[in-house]
Amino acid sequence: MLLKKKFPIKLKSMEGEFMKLDIVRGIIKNIQASDILIKTLQENVDKDLDGTLFLGYLLKAADQNVITVDALLVSEKFGLVAFIFSSGSQEEVYDQYDKMFYQLENTLTQYNSLRKGRKLAFEPNVITFFPSQEMGLLPNEHNGNEYLFANPSNLDSKLNELEEFDQGLFNRLQEALQKVSTMKPKKDRGNVKKASSLGNKMKIIEKEIANLDQWQKKAAFEVPEGPQRVRGLAGSGKTVVLALKAAYLHAQHPEWDIAVTFYSRALGQQFREMITNFSFEYLGHEPNFKKLHILHSWGTGNEIGIYSITARDLNITPITFNNAKAKYGRDNAFEGICKELLLLMSDNHPPVYDAILIDEAQDLPISFFKICYKITKDPKRIVFAYDELQNLTNAGMPDVRELFGDDEHGNPLVTLDGAKNKAQQDIVLPICYRNSRWTLTLAHALGFGIYREGGLVQLFKDLDLWDDIGYRKVTGILEYGKDVSLKRKEDSSPTYFDELIGADDAIEVRGFRDVNEQYRWVADQIENDIVEEELDYDDILVIFPDAYYSKSEYMEFRRFLLSKNIKSNLAGITTDRDTFRVDDTVTCAHIYRAKGNEAPKVYVVNSEHCARGSEMIRLRNTLFTAITRSRAWVKICGVGQEMNIIKSEIEECIRRDYKLEFKIPTIQELDRMRLIHGDKTEEDKKKINRANSSINELIELVEKGLVDPSTMPQLQALLNTLRAKEDEDEFEE
């Protein structure tokens, strides 16, 4: 989730115009004064003013108490300007000004990048802004100090009288104020010596200044009076902005009970580390985890989670995963127990949390959201973030009405207000910072089955999403039943991928004759990555797509790494279930553990597992998720004829210059795809397996001459059914 100084991105607003003054609405204490200041800046000050105006920005005070800046302007032209909406006596106005100036200096001098010798490299500015035209006439000198006062009529002249700002400091100033580099500290990479190594390329990328883009700033700091939805691709920064928001809310309201919840257990460690780092920036100490609760969505009898806490509040023993799986099946286990719990919760269930932040919302059932609604206090500050295409279809992510339900009058409990001059309730993060445009396009091609011999596996129904997630139309028509060609927009990815990596280096596909040959090659590559390419152990992630067999596959693969004295772990199996990475160790993981994590270089082994099967949507989602864990390089490996299927699709995508060219199905065809390729019940799986076995047995008998097909009416009926199906498809086309 990085914006680059050396490799800049031209950001556009949601309306398509190049971004100028961006307003980020945090917790606002004086709405009227804020509105007047915004109007004055937009209408009476330079109309080309480029920068960000933070409303309700937090500073860490020297005495460990936080100070909220009413409005903080950060721009290349004026540098840093803090606005105070002052009230009280004349002496109090001067006192508030002095405290703010001191606090700005105290905050900024903590950053080496903003100092010049013993002092700050620039002068921070403070302006006391009086919304009324008649005010702002206090003396500009008091007790030997100078002060700046302004009202709507003279703000323009006051700003233009400020000392000229060194624009070379602008990105460093943004980094200091947004705290992102503190939350995700840059690696030392002291072992890097070669200019051409992969390790050095990562060092260059990681040294670039980390700043939030305009949409990430809104998602992180804007606090609407009600729910908020954050949507974006893998790598668009959803987890980071949720961590920022959690720490921001906690610092502003330490008395609140705030819950941060998620689906993948490995995210717990990430959230705790990032929120802790960010809280140190604002509070000077770690957060109060008795008020800021980092909770798994489920929890167990021995571990707290949203579900288990709510169950205990109702004097119910939480159901374990194994018991839920036995009752509802693996795929419906959590949904089943959440539905049970929801039925026991009354309409006036006492709410517990002042805010709930939900990551990986696409993996959680509707019943879980309804539980969250009941346990959240008014005005229902529920922030939920999800990957627009983590499951490659929006059929799996219902709209907000379905998520939260209706009231007794049939009206939706939750609506998302898109009013222009309010904190946004629906935010799309359109830029993918993790994956190159080639990697992401390839992941979509495989996930959707764009170049699959048997045709598309799935597609989301909302065609407008293509634009939202960073694709542009090359040719054709973006309508149901029409041919179209799509390609990633140039500004949907950071340009450092082009500068440092390139398509040929970013992606490699390899097919092997057998598993041992595959594992030997991958182990050789990892040894080269560490020894020659100067990557760290934790820069490498090996993913096993088949979770069921991942343990046995890993134990076999591990032998090849050990032969090279390379330590490894299988996340959640050879480590405790909440630990993903271990120092000086290559991390291996099955797809469910890998989800929510990333690494500069990813090896997807045994990819043939995703080539074909009765649940193609699940298999292709697995491949999509595995590929999009890569921050720079991905190696897609597999064995045998099945791997050739994957390989041919990849080669076709590359041949077409990483464009998605296909015929968009009709709504009816999309529904049929979901029925054919979607998840099956355990009973359906048994029927399909029995049918496959019977067909294979029949083919063998026919080949041996033991059965004459002409004497089997059932076989003729099957052929007639297949012909009728083909005729139906041709008619619809």
Image (spheres, rainbow, N blue to C red):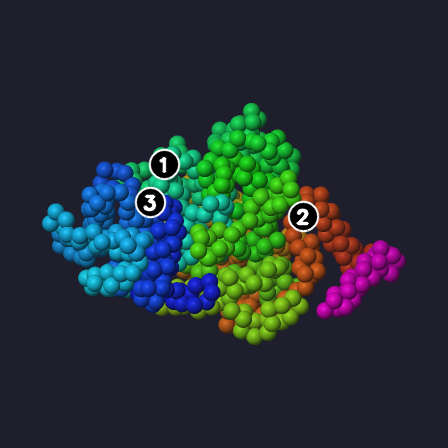
Under mark 1, the amino acid is: Pro
Residue tagged 1: 254
Looking at the image, residue 269 lies above or below residue 509: above
Q: Is residue 20 visible?
A: yes
Q: Nearer the viewer, residue 94 or 20?
A: 94
Mark seen at residue 216? none
Residue 71: x and y in percent read 32, 52
Indicate left or right for 141 with 375 as reference.
left
To which quarter of the image does residue 643 belong? bottom right
Alpha carbon distance from label 3 to label 1: 14 Å
Q: Is residue 281 visible?
A: no
Q: Nearer the viewer, residue 544 or 452?
A: 452
Name the quadrant of the C terminus. bottom right
Looking at the image, residue 193 lies above or below residue 256: below
Looking at the image, residue 497 lies above or below residue 34: below
Looking at the image, residue 117 lies above or below residue 298: below
Tag 2 or tag 3, which sits nearer the N-term?
A: 3
Q: Nearer the viewer, mark 2 or mark 1?
A: 1
**Residues rendered magenta in the picture:** 707-733
Q: Nearer the viewer, mark 3 or mark 1?
A: 1
Residue tagged 3: 278
Indicate left or right for 711 with 359 as reference.
right
Under mark 2, the amino acid is: Lys
Under mark 3, the amino acid is: Phe
Residue tagged 2: 680
